[in-house]
């Protein structure tokens, strides 16, 4: 076993600015904020859960990142509802993304290329009659 340290290979505090630049174009940041807002609004009785998967479309290419956003109702034996999915179009895991909403009727939004547009579509999904019904019928306020 080598005595060589990995300290030089680990990111340094000074590199945090690089992380902030990367996060500007990372759809996960929006999903994380939505999850936090749900936790705050419903005092932990509804959880916003994000799953991340990746898959390879082309054996010679890189992997594509895909997120699914679920509502989990703690007071209903953790009843889970898949609200939408967001799939990165490119291998870099950044915008543009494709969103599939599981409201009624299901909608697909292609080529969402910036954070503001992603946030607008999430707002549209949350205002959808089916999404509101799911939340209101499974959460006792």
Image (cartoon, rainbow, N blue to C red):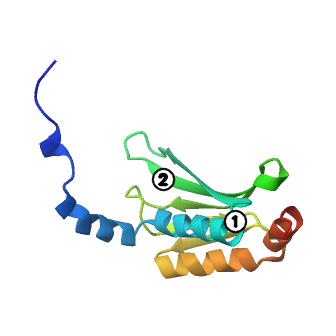
Q: From this viewpoint, which residue is outermost toward the front?
A: 43
- As drawn, the label of residue 53 is none
In the image, 53: left or right of 8? right
Q: Residue 138's quadrant in the figure?
A: bottom right
Q: Residue 72's quadrant in the figure?
A: bottom right
- Residue 65 placement (x, y as % from top left): 48, 53
Residue drawn at x 75%, y 63% is 102
Residue 100 visible, this orientation: yes
In the image, 62: left or right of 103? left
- Residue 85 placement (x, y as % from top left): 63, 60
In the image, 137: left or right of 80? right
Residue 80 visible, this orientation: no
**Residue labelled with disc 2:** 65
Please rate how many residues cluster around mark 1, counting C-alpha atoms within 10 Å: few if below 14, some from 14 to 19, many from 20.
Answer: few
Helix, strand or loop status at disc 2: strand
Residue drawn at x 24%, y 69% is 17
The mark lying in front, picked from 1 and 2, is 1
Residue drawn at x 47%, y 75% is 113
- Residue 44 placement (x, y as % from top left): 69, 60
Q: Which one is in front, 75 or 67?
A: 75
In the image, 93: left or right of 42? left
The C terminus lies in quadrant: bottom right
Q: From this viewpoint, which residue is outermost toward the right?
A: 137
Q: Which one is in front, 131 or 138?
A: 138
The N terminus lies in quadrant: top left
Helix, strand or loop status at disc 1: loop
**Residue labelled with disc 1:** 43
């Amino acid at each position: 076993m080598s005595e060589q340290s990995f300290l030089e290979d680990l990111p340094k505090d000074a590199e945090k600015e690089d992380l902030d630049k990367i996060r500007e174009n990372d759809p996960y940041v929006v999903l994380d904020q939505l999850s936090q807002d749900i936790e705050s609004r419903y005092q932990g009785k509804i959880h916003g859960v994000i799953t991340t998967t990746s898959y390879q479309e082309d054996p010679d290419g890189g992997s594509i990142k895909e997120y699914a956003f679920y509502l989990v109702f703690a007071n209903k034996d953790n009843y889970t509802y898949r609200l939408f999915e967001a799939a990165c179009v490119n291998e870099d895991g950044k915008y543009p993304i494709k969103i599939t909403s599981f409201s009624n009727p299901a909608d697909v939004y292609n080529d969402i290329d910036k954070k503001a547009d992603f946030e607008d579509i999430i707002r549209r999904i949350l205002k959808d009659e089916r999404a509101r019904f799911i939340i209101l019928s499974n959460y006792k306020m």
